Amino acid sequence: MHQKIGVPLSLYQCSFPLLQCELMRHIPRQLRRNEAVFSDLLQFIVKITLLDMSLAVERYFAASVFVLEESLDGVRGEKERLHKLAVTDGLTELHNHAYARHSLANALQHAAANAAPLCIIMADLDHFKKINDAHGHLVGDQILRIAAQCMLAGARVGDEIGRYGGEEFLFILRSTDIAEGRIVAERVRERVGANAIHARNMAINVSLSLGMRIVRIRGHYVRRETVGAS
């Protein structure tokens, strides 16, 4: 109430010592004669008025705190939006080239630190230039978007996929050996080529070629095993 009608907090706080004095002044005489009871009452008055004052201060600043929290939420939301824009390919909504390389560097460090195999898959849409030449770049863009969604559907939770450039894609599969990598690569290939992609009333068949490499890091020793999955 005092905050709403514009009473300054400093003036409001000045009233609490007066309130304490008034409460102490009105303690009955018979209670004052009992030293223990009188001491307990004084402590109670001090505590209850301090509590009241702290609650009052909290209410004074509640509105400002609410506004600040809303502002912080807005800043966090904007930060997340900008981060997503910075790391996302605008066409396919996969990781962009720069972030894909950053993720690969992190994955290599993780593999080295944990002595875990790292599976790297490069994928390429077959004859994509012919599709662009025959049907136009808008159709090509639509095919890239749909193919990217098929890749996501074929990958596992936690696998990272980035658009490496044009119609090339990079898959980063952490803690994944040759056998597991082959399963993922084959599933992705099947997902992309399973059905013709419809664009502008045309059914366009798309296929995907993939190359896989397993990196095993033991101290300073790097072992690379390349497996075709086309």
Image: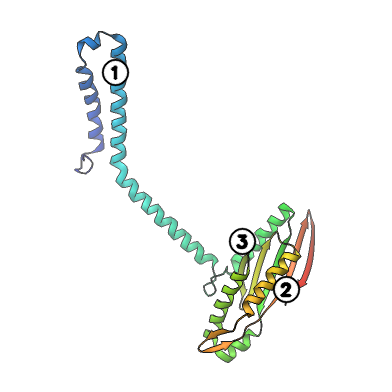
Of residues 20 and 177, the one nearer the viewer is 177
- For the residues marked 3 and 1, what is the alpha-carbon distance in whole angstroms? 63 Å
For residue 195, what is the image quadrant?
Answer: bottom right
Q: Decide if residue 56 is on the left or right side of residue 76.
A: left
Mark nearer the N terminus (2 vs 1): 1
Q: Residue furthest bottom?
A: 134
- The relative height of residue 129 versus residue 150 in the rendered view (above or below) is below
Q: Earlier in the sequence, mark 2 or mark 3?
A: 3
Question: How many numbered discs?
Answer: 3
Q: Secondary structure at mark 3?
A: loop
Report the residue marked by disc 2.
Answer: 211
Q: Which label's residue is closer to the chain start, 3 or 1?
A: 1
Q: Residue at x 69, y 71 (%)?
A: 185
Q: Position of residue 116 (x, y in %)?
A: 73, 56
Residue 187 placement (x, y as % from top left) = 66, 72
Nearer to the camera, 114 or 188: 188
Task: Give the label, 2 or 3, closer to the camera.
Answer: 3
Q: Which residue is mark 1?
A: 42
Q: Which mark is residue 140?
A: none
Q: Is residue 131 above or below residue 32?
A: below
Q: Quadrant of the C terminus?
A: bottom right
Q: Are marks 2 and 1 in contact (CB under 8 Å)?
A: no
Residue at the limit of the structure toward the front, as seen here: 194
Q: Residue at x 24, y 23 (%)?
A: 20
Residue to which mark 3 is pinned: 158
